[in-house]
Image (cartoon, helix red, strand yellow):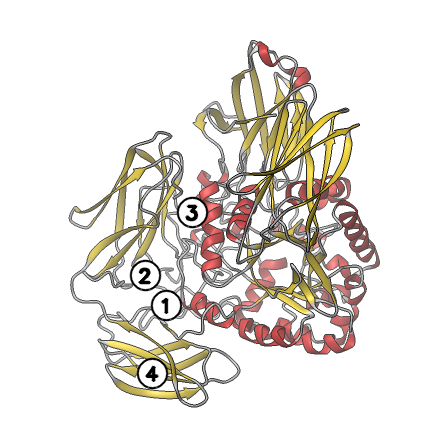
């Protein structure tokens, strides 16, 4: 089996237009579309226009391969993909988030030039509640299979036991023959087992001195299957999953609490394009602040993300879809669900099966159909089908408990009628109406609504069909339902940031509360502005609404920057005991826009020039009995923590040093943290996240206005320009949810003193990227990044 990168030298354009551009994959076609008030997708897709797109590529396959099968793997095309080879239509796939294979063997001209065309249809808007991107936004591979071969996805490895470590390898081939099954660790081959197969066989092997895969030790093995000279390789981990009412969720026999974050599929400034380095970075930064799990909201995640999770030790709840038979937007996947769900789920399981990071599947998100008999039957049907495909992992569904009750009363957030109105509306409907209402009323309304008797009645039947009950915003039900349903496992599939500490304390005492997934771990494109706390300094009072870009709801902002919420999360989820200090912006013009999905806009800075004597809100995050706050050595207050790890101090701003000291019950110091005001000198610091970059890889370069000691100056906001040599500028932008500029230009404003550039290296070794930033009166800051083969960015 030969796997060939098929991502270079594509010609792309809007369907029907004559202009064509050379592009490489992954490529997000929507990212460069106009953002405008006439966008039918509106705030759902960051006000971009949707369109239909074509991709085309010529390629050559020599005569020496004429006895081989030729297949193409598309990891993701959004949406309604059509694939033609030499003018013949070979594939149609409506769902934009599943990978699929195209067997082109009968249509290939060996020894001649061939042509492949891919069409993506995304002009029917709105078709999503978030930014989808469009086109061939995930990689493509060409696969050459010899006459006798292991089938694609034909090797599946599962762990049978740990003591001793035994695995079962299921192998499917396209005919009878001899197999050589090899197991490799990180440095050498451990064993080789030769057997004969008639086309399907399961082999059990014992692994000596096995290292188990876990979040702390993400150790990977490689299984190499040689079938009559055709080799197929797959990585796997040795780990078990168990779930039950006694011990909750166990991995390798030990209880695990899922400290999770919901993430959309986009890669921030890069749009939907699934670059390997960007997916790896996303997982690493989330793990750095204390998360051990991600929920792919609300669609199957990329292979690149799964590889990153395997390597870094991040658990995955892979989710299928956002709707079943009730529309949420007028042109969404509802029209295809009934016909395609079996094939979609099979492809998702085939993709996930050998990844030890994947520990659970979700069959849907906030599908209020689960309040109805038909939807309850679908819940059972999808769960049983997943068990048939993969008996090793549990199944859940993210159910908004209060939404189910409202739906049963005829007041549902989603309905076919509301979805139709959404297309030509002048007033908010559906999820936008709810999001705005929740922003005004706060988080308590939904959580209190979940406690109503009707909310229980309209979810219990669906929960009985699942292995694990997924509660969206239902934390106030946990204690009651633990008693009422003694066999139920509870998972907070979607939660608010401010509930992280309460969740953690409940979960430590109750194994049947298995985890929590905050909305959201990382800010995302689309649902523009629903989680934003933005002042008029950055979003003028009567600003054009099409200037809103991101949701604003993320413990990490769209550039990957930590704020106060990330620091709070690290403490609440016991990554650290703290203390940490964060300060709300001391002076900004106009009130922030409300949001239930944001706890605070505090950042870790004590540099607020011209604000002396103004009121300042200081937040300290610590797992401690008492917290003391000092300014310039003077004690401001000492407070006892109260059922949370967040302590708020009100004081007046003054230059100097602010310090927090944490104490235990005996008033013994257990930690301290301080922030210092920046000095008067202002420089533009250029801060690459890695000193080198691999050929073709991405470099993430943060710029920040600081003093000479690298202390951030958040009030220094300027237009910065970038110039790149020896590489390609892919994106440049800031983190403010209101961003009319977007991320595709070579200049940007900064937001609270910072911005991010993403640069792609050329495909050659031993060269360098030169990046030049300018602002103001031609003030220049330059960095050179060596390109070294095999070095990750």
Decide which of tag 1 and tag 2 comes sooner along the chain.
1
Q: Mark 3 points at which residue?
A: 269
Residue 620 percent location from the top left of the image? 40, 77
Separation of marks 3 and 2 at Cα, in angstroms = 17 Å
| CB-based contact (under 8 Å), mark 1 and mark 2 | yes
Q: Which of 78 and 24 is in front in this view?
A: 24
Whether pointer 3 and pointer 1 mark residues with C-beta atoms closer than 8 Å, the reply is: no
| Label 1 crowd bin: few (<14), some (14–19), many (20+), radius 10 Å | many
- For disc 2, the marked residue is 752
Front residue (pair 464, 597)? 464
Choose the circle earlier in sequence order: 4 or 2.
4
Q: Is mark 3 on a helix, strand or loop?
A: helix
Residue at screen point 37% across, 69% down:
590
Q: Do the residues labelled 4 and 1 touch (CB within 8 Å)?
A: no
- Circle 4 is placed at which residue position? 629
In the image: residue 676, left or right of residue 744: left
Quarter of the image where one finds residue 233: top right
Q: How far apart are marks 4 and 2 (CA)?
A: 24 Å
Report x, y in % for residue 15: 54, 28
Identity of the residue drawn at 56% across and 51% down: 130
Compared with residue 3, is residue 770 higher up or lower down, i.e. above or below? below
Q: Quadrant of residue 682?
A: bottom left
Look at the numbered disc 2 and give the secondary structure of its residue: loop
Name the quadrant of the C terminus.
Answer: top left
Question: Which residue corresponds to mark 1?
Answer: 603
- At 63% from the left and 29% from the top, the residue drawn is 82
Cα–Cα span, label 4 and label 3: 37 Å
């Amino acid at each position: 089996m030969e796997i060939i990168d098929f991502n270079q030298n594509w010609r792309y354009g809007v369907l029907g237009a004559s202009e064509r551009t050379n592009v490489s994959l992954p490529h997000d076609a929507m990212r460069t579309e106009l953002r405008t008030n006439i966008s039918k997708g509106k705030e759902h897709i960051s006000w971009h226009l949707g369109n239909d797109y074509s991709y085309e590529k010529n390629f050559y396959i020599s005569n020496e391969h004429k006895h081989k099968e030729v297949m193409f793997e598309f990891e993701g095309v959004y949406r309604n993909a059509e694939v033609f080879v030499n003018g013949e239509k070979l594939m149609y796939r409506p769902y934009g988030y599943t990978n699929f294979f195209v067997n082109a063997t009968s249509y290939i001209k060996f020894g001649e030039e061939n042509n492949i065309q891919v069409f993506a249809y995304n002009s029917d808007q709105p078709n999503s509640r978030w930014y989808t991107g469009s086109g061939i936004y995930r990689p493509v591979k060409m696969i050459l299979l010899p006459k006798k071969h292991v089938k694609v996805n034909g090797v599946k490895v599962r762990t049978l036991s740990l003591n001793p470590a035994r695995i079962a390898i299921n192998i499917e081939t396209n005919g009878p023959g001899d197999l050589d099954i090899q197991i490799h660790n990180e440095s050498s081959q451990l064993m080789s087992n030769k057997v004969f197969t008639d086309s399907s066989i399961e082999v059990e092997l014992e692994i000596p001195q096995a290292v188990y895969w876990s979040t702390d030790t993400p150790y990977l093995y490689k299984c190499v299957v040689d079938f009559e000279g055709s080799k197929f390789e797959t990585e796997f981990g040795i780990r078990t999953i168990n779930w039950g009412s006694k011990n909750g969720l166990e991995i390798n026999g030990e209880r695990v609490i899922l400290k999770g974050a919901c993430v959309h599929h986009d890669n921030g400034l890069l749009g939907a394009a699934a670059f390997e380095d960007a997916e790896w970075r996303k997982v690493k930064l989330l793990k750095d602040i204390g998360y051990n799990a991600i929920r792919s909201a609300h669609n199957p995640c990329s292979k690149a993300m799964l590889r990153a999770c395997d390597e870094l030790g991040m658990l995955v709840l892979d989710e299928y879809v956002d709707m079943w038979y009730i529309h949420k937007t007028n042109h969404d996947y509802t029209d295809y669900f009934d016909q395609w769900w079996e094939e979609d789920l099979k492809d998702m399981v085939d993709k996930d099966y050998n990844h030890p990071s994947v520990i659970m599947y979700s069959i849907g998100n906030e599908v209020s159909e689960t309040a109805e008999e038909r939807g309850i039957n679908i819940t059972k049907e999808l769960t049983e089908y997943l068990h048939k495909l993969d008996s090793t992992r549990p199944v859940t569904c993210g159910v908004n408990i209060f939404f189910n009750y409202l739906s049963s009363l005829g007041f549902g957030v989603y309905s076919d009628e509301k979805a139709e109105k959404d297309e030509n509306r002048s007033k908010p409907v559906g999820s936008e109406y709810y999001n705005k209402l929740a922003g005004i009323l706060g988080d308590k309304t939904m959580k209190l609504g979940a406690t109503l008797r009707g909310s229980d009645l309209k979810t219990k039947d669906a929960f009985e069909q699942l292995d694990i009950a997924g509660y969206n915003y239902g934390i106030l039900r946990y204690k009651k339902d633990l008693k009422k349903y003694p066999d139920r496992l509870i998972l907070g599939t979607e939660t608010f940031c401010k509930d992280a500490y309460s969740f953690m304390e409940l979960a430590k005492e109750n194994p049947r509360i298995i985890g929590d997934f905050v909305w959201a771990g990382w800010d995302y494109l689309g649902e523009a502005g629903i989680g934003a706390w933005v002042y008029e300094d950055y979003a003028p009072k009567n600003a054009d609404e099409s200037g809103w870009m991101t949701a604003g709801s993320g413990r990490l902002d769209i550039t990957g920057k930590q704020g106060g919420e990330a620091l709070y999360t690290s403490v609440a989820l016991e990554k650290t005991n703290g203390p940490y200090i964060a300060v709300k912006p001391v002076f900004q013009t106009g009130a922030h826009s409300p949001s239930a999905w944001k706890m605070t806009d505090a950042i870790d800075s004590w540099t607020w020039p011209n604000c002396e004597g103004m009121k300042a809100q200081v937040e300290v995050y610590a797992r401690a009995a008492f917290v003391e706050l000092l300014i310039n050595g003077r004690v401001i207050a000492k407070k006892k923590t109260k059922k949370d790890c967040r302590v708020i101090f009100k004081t007046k701003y003054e230059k100097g040093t602010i310090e927090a000291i944490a104490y235990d019950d005996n008033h013994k110091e257990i930690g301290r943290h301080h922030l210092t005001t920046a000095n008067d000198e202002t420089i533009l610091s250029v801060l690459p996240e890695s000193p080198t970059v691999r050929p073709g890889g991405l470099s993430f370069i943060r710029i920040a206005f600081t003093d000479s000691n690298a202390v951030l100056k958040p009030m220094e906001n300027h237009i910065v320009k970038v110039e790149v040599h020896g590489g390609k500028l892919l994106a440049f932008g800031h983190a403010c949810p209101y961003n009319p500029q977007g991320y595709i230009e070579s200049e940007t404003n900064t937001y609270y003193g910072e911005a991010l550039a993403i640069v792609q290296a050329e495909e050659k070794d031993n060269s360098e990227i030169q990046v030049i930033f300018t602002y103001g009166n031609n003030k220049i800051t330059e960095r050179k990044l060596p390109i070294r083969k095999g070095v990750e960015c």
